[in-house]
Amino acid sequence: MKFLRETGFLALSALFLLVELGCGDQYRPVANPIVSPGGQPQTTHFAWVVNYNANGDGSTTQIDVSGDTNTAVNAMGVGSIAEAFPVNSLALYVANSGDDTVSEYVPTLSGPVTTINLLPGSHPVALGTAQNSAMYVLNSGANSACPSTGSISVIKTATLSVTSTTCVGHNPTALAQSSSSGFVYVVNQGDGTVSVFNPAGPSGMGTVTGLGQNPVSATASVNGNWIFIVTQGDGTGPGTLDIIDASTAGGATTVAASVSLGVGPTISIIDPNLNRLYVANTGGNSVSVFDASNVNPSNSPAMPLLGTASVGTSPIGITPLANGSLFYVLNSGSNNVTVVSANSFSALTNVALPTGADPVFIASDPTSSKVYVADKGTSETTIIQTSNNTITQNIPAPTQVSGCTSSCALQQPMMIVTE
């Protein structure tokens, strides 16, 4: 979610014009059978919020970082739930779980939204990639290609078409791709396994062996050589971080080493600037911080623990600032955000979220000036200014019914990416 260059607004406009002209025909027809965005050359930065609509098409909200303003709303498909940029791409992809589609469009332009159809019944729930040539989509539902399990679909970005759908485990919920080998690791929460998919073939490489109990998330190292799998264990004792050597086919399906985590870990995120791995221990109200630049399965531990930060109740999300000074932890139980020093790992302050926020996601912008929180309960995106850790805006999501002007039910923010 993450990846800045310095040109002015006029240069950005020129770049988009060149992209449009280079593509020829701007209209792309519907294609039939889908914690990171790619770099966008601009000095103006945005946050894009995916909004779920219980009564129709979902949407994305575009927020200008410098002005804290809602600059655009784009309609997506039914059940919009996740989003991602291919590496070094201007196009945003959104998974629509309710109508088995993926939406693709170029933000900041008023061009069309392309709808990419998946197999009926696919029910996409997540997507991601470490490439610019393909987007990988996790499908939790049964379809004609995989009638008894979940699946992974490959969308080629050049053609905006699904080129393959391959079976994985039951109820896949998360994925991570190695940028070095191209292997895609899929967490199947329905059966507690991790599937390995090789886009170059053969289509399936099997299941990771030696894995801990109840895997919940997957994260790739900065260089792509390692995949980190968070496993919860029995839910009452410490979880583990299983480390997989993704650099070669020989190590792709075996756990090379494991390190201990806190109680009830749920999610991890890589900090590409400091080369650290952060893990939220939801049951233990803490965050484990590892040195991801020093992974060696022969050592004990295989990856050094730099520190453990005590945070609020039930942490479920982490976002490190790009300048390396702080990281922000989203706490669903205490309904706040803990600001933690990236040097001492001590909590500096807590930022209270609106009453009933029910926060579900957190992200920071590339300039380290703003932090964004998706508040599902209040249907708002909370913006925190990092210079003084105060809330500058609570931007409401679009209405569920287009054109509604009075007593309107709002959509629910679910995920945020920034550029």
Image: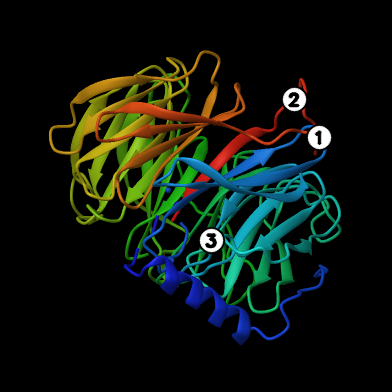
Where does residue 121 sit, x and y in percent of width and height?
84, 50
- The answer to whether 215 is drawn above or below residue 93 in the figure is above
| Contact? badges 1 and 2 (CB < 8 Å) | yes
Quarter holding residue 413: top right
Between circles 3 and 2, the one closer to the viewer is 2
Amino acid carrying mark 2 in the image: Ala
Q: Nearer the viewer, residue 175 or 169?
A: 175
Q: Nearer the viewer, residue 137 or 419?
A: 419
Coloration mode: rainbow
Question: Is 341 on the left or on the right of 121, as rendered?
Answer: left
Per the image, the residue denoted by label 3 is 85
| Contact? badges 3 and 1 (CB < 8 Å) | no
Amino acid carrying mark 3 in the image: Phe
Distance Cα–Cα, label 1 vs label 2: 8 Å
Is disc 1 surrounded by few (<14), some (14 to 19) or many (20+) residues within 10 Å?
A: some
Per the image, the residue denoted by label 2 is 409
Residue in the picture at 42% in, 55% down: 45
Quarter holding residue 403: top right
**Secondary structure type for disc 2:** loop
Label 3 vs 2, first from the N-terminus: 3
Residue in the picture at 13% in, 32% down: 344
Question: Is 163 on the left or on the right of 62, as rendered?
Answer: right
Where does residue 214 sit, x and y in percent of width and height?
52, 35
Is disc 2 surrounded by few (<14), some (14 to 19) or many (20+) residues within 10 Å?
A: some
Per the image, the residue denoted by label 1 is 401
Residue 356, label in figure: none
Residue in the picture at 71% in, 77% down: 26
